[in-house]
């Protein structure tokens, strides 16, 4: 029997490689297929934005074109 991709019970949050150190980060993400979760890194217990991963990828790609 084949087992597909499993989504972790606890999201694996990460910050951009462009984020600075010493608590200057402001956004972190986690992939929870088929959604991408986004939150304020300084308020980890605060609200979480959930968007379609394809839409998030288009947003990030548009930022790279600037």
Image (cartoon, rainbow, N blue to C red):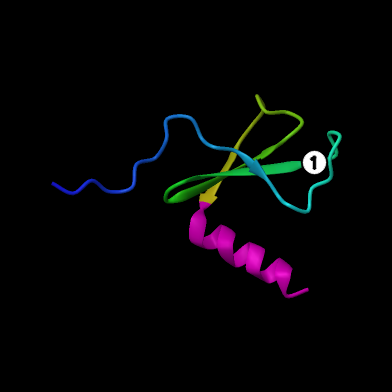
**In the rendered image, the vertical position of residue 54 relative to residue 48, given as above or below:** below
The residue sitting at 50% across, 62% down in the picture is: 54
**Residue at the farthest left position:** 1
Looking at the rendered structure, the secondary structure element under dot 1 is loop
Q: Is residue 12 left or right of residue 5?
A: right
User: How many numbered marks appear?
Assistant: 1
Q: Position of residue 57 (x, y in %)?
A: 57, 62
Neighbourhood count class around disc 1 (C-alpha, 10 Å): few under 14, some 14–19, many 20 upward: some
The picture quadrant where one finds residue 42 is top right
Above or below — where is 33 with respect to 21?
Answer: below
Which of these two is toward me, 12 or 49? 12
Q: Over which residues does the magenta segment extend?
A: 52-66
Q: Position of residue 66 (x, y in %)?
A: 78, 73
- Per the picture, the main secondary structure of the magenta-coloured stretch is helix
Q: Quadrant of residue 29?
A: top right
- Taking the spot 63% from the left edge, 63% from the top edge, the residue there is 59
Measured as percent of width and height from the top left, residue 50 is found at 54, 44
Q: Is residue 64 left or right of residue 58?
A: right
User: Does the stretch in magenta take in 8?
Assistant: no
- Residue 27 picture location, percent across and down: 72, 43
Judged from this view, the residue extending furthest toward the top is 45
- Residue drawn at the location 78% of the way across and 53% of the way down: 18
Residue wearing tag 1: 25
Residue closest to the far bottom: 65
In the image, residue 9 above or below residue 2: above
């Amino acid at each position: 029997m084949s087992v597909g991709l499993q989504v972790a019970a606890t999201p694996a949050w990460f910050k951009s490689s462009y984020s600075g150190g010493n608590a200057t980060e402001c956004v972190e993400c986690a992939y929870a297929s088929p959604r991408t979760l986004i939150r304020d890194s300084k308020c980890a217990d605060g609200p979480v934005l959930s968007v379609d991963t394809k839409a998030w990828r288009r947003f990030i790609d548009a930022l790279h074109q600037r």
